[in-house]
Every structure is written in C-alpha cells, then in structure tokens.
Amino acid sequence: MRIPRPRSLAGQLFAMQVVLVAAIVAGCALFTYITDRSQAEETARRQSRATATAVARSPSVVAAARSAHPTEQLQPYAERLRRDAGVNFVVIMAPDGTRWTHPEPGQIGKTYLGSIDEALKGKIYSEKHLGTLGPSVRTVAPVYDNGKITGLVSAGITIEKISEQVSKQVAALLGVAGAALALGGLGTYVINARLRRHTHGMNAAELSRMHDYHEAALHAVREGLVMLDGRRRIALVNDGARELLGLDEDVVGRPVDSLGLPAPLTGALLSAEPRVDEVHLTADRVIVVNTSPVVGGEQRGTVVTLRDHTELQALSGELDSERGFTQALRSQAHEAANRLHTVVSLIELGRADEAVEFATAELELAQALTDRVVGSVGEPVLAALLLGKAAQANERGVELVLAEDSRIDDGLLPPSLPARDLVTILGNLIDNAVDAASEAAGTRSLRARVTVTARAECDELLLRVADTGAGVDPADADEVFRRGWSTHGAGRGLGLALVKQAAHRSRGAVRLAEGPDGGAEFTVRLPLRPAEVRA
C-alpha cells in the first residue's frame, strides 16, 4: 500500500489561507447580520415612537377621545396613518385599554394586549410584545386633554417585517461575502501557485530537511564556496571560502569590491562571464577560481568555487628544482665521464703527472663551491638548493657565487619559516637571476654571474640575490611582483608573485633595487621570532 505523500508547503498554505479567508468572511457576515438586526429593531423603535407621539398629540385625536363614539372618527384616521407611516398597526384606546381602533376591525372594543402602566403614568414607553398580529416592537404614548389622560396610542412594527428587511440585507451581504471569498480564494491560489513553483512542490518537512543537508554540506566541503546575488553582494559563504579569502564573520551582505581582495581576483568575481580554473593570488595563498553565473530570465547572481593551489604550487616548484638538479647531475656525470676518459688517456700515453694535475684541478674546482656552501649554510634544504642551482647555472654558463658574509647555522630557522617557503623564495629569485644574467651575457662585458647572500642576523633572515643582467626599469618596480608580469611573454610571471606571497606569509618583506653590477638585486627579510615575542 502506497503511503500518501504529505501535502506540499504551498498546498498547506493554500488550504490554511482559504479556511482563514472563509472564517473572516463568515465572521464579518455574522457580525453584520447581528448589527443590522439590532439597527433594524432600533429603527423600528424610533419609527413607532415617532408615530405614537404624533398621533397622541394630534388635536383630532384629543377631540375624538371626548366624543361618545371615538371609533367612528379614529378608525379611518388610524388606518390611513398606518399606511402612510409604514407601521404595522396604530391602536388608539381608552385609558382602561379598550381598543377604539385596530387593523383588524374584529379586535375593536377588546382589551389591548400589552403594558400600559407606564403610559398611564404619563411616560412614553417602548417594548417588545406578542400581540394579535404577532411579536412586535411597539410604543405606547398618553393622550392629554387639559392635563388629564383621556386615551392611549400604541404604534408598532412586527418582528416579521423587521426580519424581512434584515433578510433582504443579509441576501445582499451574502452576495458580497461570496464574491469576497471567491476573490480571496483566487488570489490565494495564484500566490500559492507561484510559491509551489519556487518550492518545487516540497512540503515543510522536506524543505527543513533540505536546509539541514544544505548547511551540513556547506560546512563539510573543504573547497571554498561563495554565492553572490544580482547586485554582486555576498549572499552565502562557507568556512573554506572564509579561510581562503581571509574574510570576516560579518561578510554576508557586503559588496565584493569592498572586501579588499586583489584587483584581478575581484575582477574575476565580478565578471558576468564564467571563469574556468583561473589561478589567482591572495596575500597568503594561490587559489584556483571557477565562476558560473546564475541566469533565469535575468542574471540573478554568481556561484564561485575556490580551490587551494598553494601546496600544489609549492610542490611544483620543488619538483622543478629537483628536476633541474637531476638534469644538472646527469650533465655533470657526462662531463665526469669525459674527464675520466681524458685522465685514462693521459696515463696510457705515459704522462701520469699531467693526468694527476688535470684530475686534481677539476676536483678542486668542483669541491670549492660545495665546501663554501656546506661551510656557510648549515640548513640542509637551503644548502641542497644552492648546490643544485649552482649546477643548473653552470650548465647555462652562469657562475653562481655565495657571498663571503653568508652564514646560516643548522637549527637556527624556526618552525614559523617552513623550508618549503624558503625554497619558493630563493629558488624563484635564483631562477630569474640566472635567466637575466644568461640573456645579458652576450651584450655586456661582465661575465654572467649571480651572487647569493644568505645570512641570519639580529633575529632576521636576509636572503639577497643579485645578477649581472639588464636590471629592471624603476617604473616597473612595483609591477614585477604582480602575477602575469614577465619579460618572457605570456604564460609566465608567477615566480616573483609567489616570492612576495611566501614572504608575506612569513611576515617578511621583499625589496627590489639596482645591484652592484648594474643588474637587479632582490632582498628578502624574514623575522626569525614569532610575532608575539617580537617587540
């Protein structure tokens, strides 16, 4: 047996609204009916009072009350007045209640059915009473003749006539109420049809469950997720996006261009066109950005996904360094084989002294830089990087020199300066310097050289790389650290941006100046103490 699906939220609201509209209309109709009936009875009371008072004060009635046969004069008068005044009866009687007039002639001469005590006291009195014509609203007024009560007048309107008038009003009221109910139901249906489309026919439990799933998924996803509304304001952001973009807790509702993000990243978020796997830099991270506009007749917003590319980029840099180091070792192995063949050939020719001299010279030349690096740089990662870069530079005809004042003891670098960031900083600076020195080697008289300074001093790590290249235009001093800036064409220009980012991540700074040989000189200063310890 199939269990019936709960009514959708739109259906529940429609039913509730229809019941509510019906209850309101019924309540208003009942209130109006009671009010109209009460007003109708009050109108009948005033009408009967006015009629009875007018008749009691009429001179002809006073005169007829003195006569021996009042009925002959008063009956025609009372009937004519009854028809003209719109009342059901006008009864004129003697002070003892004997009727002189009545709409039914057979009742003339009989005793009046009703209270006359108050009228005999000189008061005009109104009441509801069951008479010969049925229940009625009536008023009794005394007839005075020279200060003496000589008769009484009763004028009234039956309840049946009042009910008839109210019934006509109620019929009109029911028509209006029905029209109001139909109009309210139609409006409710139209609104709920629209709501049904927006909620996809789901009921309240399903919407609540979907919201719970949405919240759980939003916070569980490690990738960053940002949703922008049609006015380019943050409508939704998950924990991953807050961390990747460095956003505050109260960021929801703020425009994207007020978040202080780098200009290229802000432009990507504001773009009306989709972006696919674009790499952007923030102050501390490399992120991959994908955007997809939400379009439904008009652009309603944008969905942005963010992936952290920082670790991958750092690993790629290390892999490039290792690959270059491997190529350098392969090249050196090839050169070593050539030199070994030369030594063997000299020995076979009987020139042993020259063979020893050649082998010793080559060994001393290769060992000199190694001894210099190992003796000055105790940090193994930096030492290995320098040796590998020296081999790469040598392959390109560039001499890599370690400055005499370089000194970094092993174990000096704190955990706040990860080796990966140091490899990113020094590796990219040396690569750019080797490129610049190699390109300028043919146009300048200086031998292509790159000078590296690595020194720990005064709670600060100094890394400086100078080259004999063409240098950097002072006008581009700030632009060189922007992603995409390069003198080598499109697809380059990420290295220096990563250097600045890694330095910023370690609370350091990068400065560009002109080197002693006319080329570029990059200086990086990184603190060796945690921020809470520094003065």
Image (cartoon, rainbow, N blue to C red):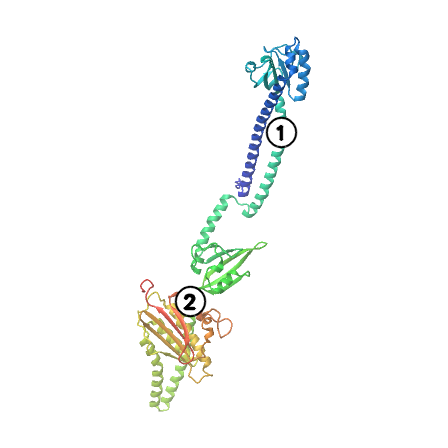
Q: Position of residue 474 (x, y in %)?
A: 45, 75
Q: Position of residue 200 (x, y in %)?
A: 55, 47
Q: Position of residue 151 (x, y in %)?
A: 61, 13
Mark whose residue sits in front, 1 or 2: 1
Pick out the residue farthest to the top: 68
Q: Which residue is mark 2?
A: 501
Q: Residues within 10 Å of mark 2 (few under 14, many from 20)?
A: many
Identify the image quadrant of the C terminus: bottom left
Q: Which residue is mark 1?
A: 169
Pick out the residue farthest to the bottom: 350
User: Identity of the amino acid at label 2?
Assistant: Gln
- Where residue 52 sits, quadrant-wise, is top right
Callout 2: SS: helix
Q: Nearer the viewer, residue 359 or 131?
A: 131
Q: Is residue 247 left or right of residue 369?
A: right
User: Identity of the amino acid at label 1?
Assistant: Gln
Q: Is residue 436 left or right of residue 383?
A: right
Residue occupying image coordinates x 35% and y 65%: 416
Q: Residues within 10 Å of mark 1 (few under 14, many from 20)?
A: some
Q: Position of residue 305 (x, y in %)?
A: 49, 59
Q: Nearer the viewer, residue 327 or 15?
A: 15
Residue occupying image coordinates x 58% and y 27%: 39
- Where residue 37 sits, quadrant-wise, is top right
In primary-sequence order, the first of circles 1 and 2 is: 1
Above or below: residue 358 compared with residue 500: below
Q: Nearer the viewer, residue 417 or 269?
A: 269
Pick out the residue farthest to the front: 146
Residue occupying image coordinates x 40% and y 84%: 338
Q: Is residue 111 left or right of residue 239?
A: right
